[in-house]
Image (tube, coloured by chain):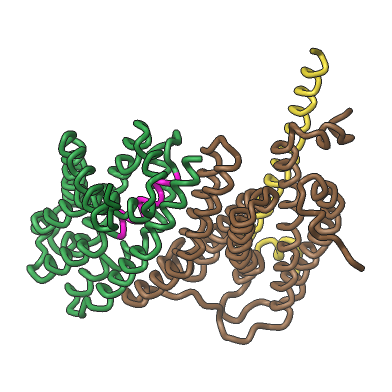
Amino acid sequence: MSVLEFFAMKGYAWYIWGSYGVAILLIIVEIMLVRHKRTITLQQLRLVRDAENED
Amino acid sequence: MTKLSMLDLLGLVVRRDLMLAMRRRADVLTTLIFFVLVVSLFPLAVGSEIDMLRKMAPGVVWVAALLASMLSLGRMFSADYLDGTLEQMLLVPQSLSMLVLSKILAHWMLSGLPLVLIAPVLGLQFDMSGEALLVLVAALLIGTPVLSMIGAFGAALTLGLRGGGVLVSLLVLPLCIPVLIFGAGAVTAVTSGVSPASNLSLLGAFLLMSLLFTPWVSAQALRISME
Amino acid sequence: MAINWFKYSAPSSFYGLAGKLIPWFAWPAALLFCMGMYIGFFVAPEDAVQSEAYRIIFIHVPASILSMMIYLIMAGYAALGLIFNTRLSSMMASALAPTGALFAFISLWTGALWGKPMWGAWWVWDARLTSELILLFLYLGFIALQASIEDPRRADRAGALLAIVGSVNVPIIYFSVQWWNTLHQGSSVKLSGTSMHIAMQQAMFTMLVAMWLYVIAIALLRVRSIILYRERNTQWVGELAEVKQ
């Protein structure tokens, strides 16, 4: 089976790759969001600590 | 001072809530009018083909009952919460669950019962048969208290929060879906010539289950919200 | 080897443990995911009835199973937090919720994309689909409730109560919808034939484990941020290397 035939998935391409595509995309987005949240939280903590050190 | 029995407490709280509601009759009436309005919207929007309307009728009436019940939930605890009465109620020696049950009963009498009474009139708009109307009223009679009870739980959880009615609805509607399914199902059954007994008895089971659990669970929710 | 488990029930010690554990779940998850995809697409044959389209099940079925399991575990943690007043348990519940909601959505999305070519409809009101949709609403309700409450302890406990009531309701909803569905003679979702080719089973199982490991990894990562924020005023947080820089 050629690469092109593989991706065509006997005509079901949109459904199959649409499913996996969206699922994988959302999982990647989730990972990015959680990591971003960690970055932001650490930033906030540092800001507060800096503000306290100033007094 | 004589100690109040549970039943006395029930009567007291119900009478009080009803009296307070009578002073703001508009609230009670708006819920009823909303119900009538929503039900009447459907034939207008969907067209007046009588067969389709007859099939839709149970679902439409039940969804409207659900929405109308949601609308009036805010009233259950918020007034007492805002003026401090609720805090006092938490200190009452009798069980808080009983108090919550009393409030639920009052709420149902003001929002559920009117729907039950007016539903036959609305059913006529959809050309429902006498038999179907009877089952509709029975189902609403058993089911609307359950809606009030589940609603009480949601109202207790979201006491004092911004987001208000929408948040309560988001929480409560998924939990009410079984009532919706069997409530509408009872009427659909009778119109298809099947006995509505199984649907109605399941509704009855929901009623019993909620009577057993929701007052206590809502009381816990109140305690959590009030700390 | 006596591990003092209770040591890790304090946010301060769990934070470090979680951080060390994450790679041990994340990398195997990624590896198994690739393996599962490989088996699912290159080893498993075409289905007699459903042709290539059935391959969606390798992501759809694990997502569905996990969305339900996560809800129960979330409710369990929430209940622990409510009963024993342990902050960390509640934090774990809050950490699991978004992933649970995500998997419920993926289940619905992939289900629709599987349903359309196979049974001609994007959506059917059968028991499983409808219950999954309601499960998504229950997750969203939990997340919305916690988001609307400022006080973290009230948020923990209100959320816990909601999650517990919800989990009692899930079987009720499932059976209600199933009954309603049989009354209405709706179409049911079935895979062709009862015996699945061994490679299909392997692919599905691999993907299930992969996604399960992913859930653990992402929940641990998320709970670390929750712990940092909730414990921001404590000394141990101030002493952390990542904060000190």
* Residue B190, placed above or below residue C148: below
* Residue depicted at x 87% and y 29%: C244
Q: Colour of chain B?
A: green
Magenta stretch contains residue C133? no
Q: In which quadrant of the rendered view does residue C241 lie? A: top right
* Residue B178, placed above or below residue B196: above
* Residue depicted at x 65% and y 64%: C59
* Residue depicted at x 26% and y 62%: B143
* Residue B171, placed above or below residue C189: above
Which chain shows up in yellow? A
Q: With A7 as the anchor, is A46 left or right in this view? A: right
Q: Colour of chain C?
A: brown
Work out whether residue C115 or residue B196 is closer to the camera in this orientation and state it.
B196
Q: Position of residue B104 (x, y in %)?
A: 29, 52
Give the farthest residue toward the front.
Answer: B1
Q: With B211 as the anchor, is B50 left or right in this view? A: left
Work out whether residue B5 or residue B100 is closer to the camera in this orientation and state it.
B5
Q: With B32 as the anchor, is C60 left or right in this view? A: right
* Residue depicted at x 79% and y 57%: C6
Work out whether residue B124 or residue B178 is closer to the camera in this orientation and state it.
B178
Work out whether residue C162 or residue C203 is closer to the camera in this orientation and state it.
C162
Q: In which quadrant of the rendered view does residue A11 lie? A: bottom right
Q: Position of residue B135 (x, y in %)?
A: 16, 69
Magenta segment, which residues?
B146-157
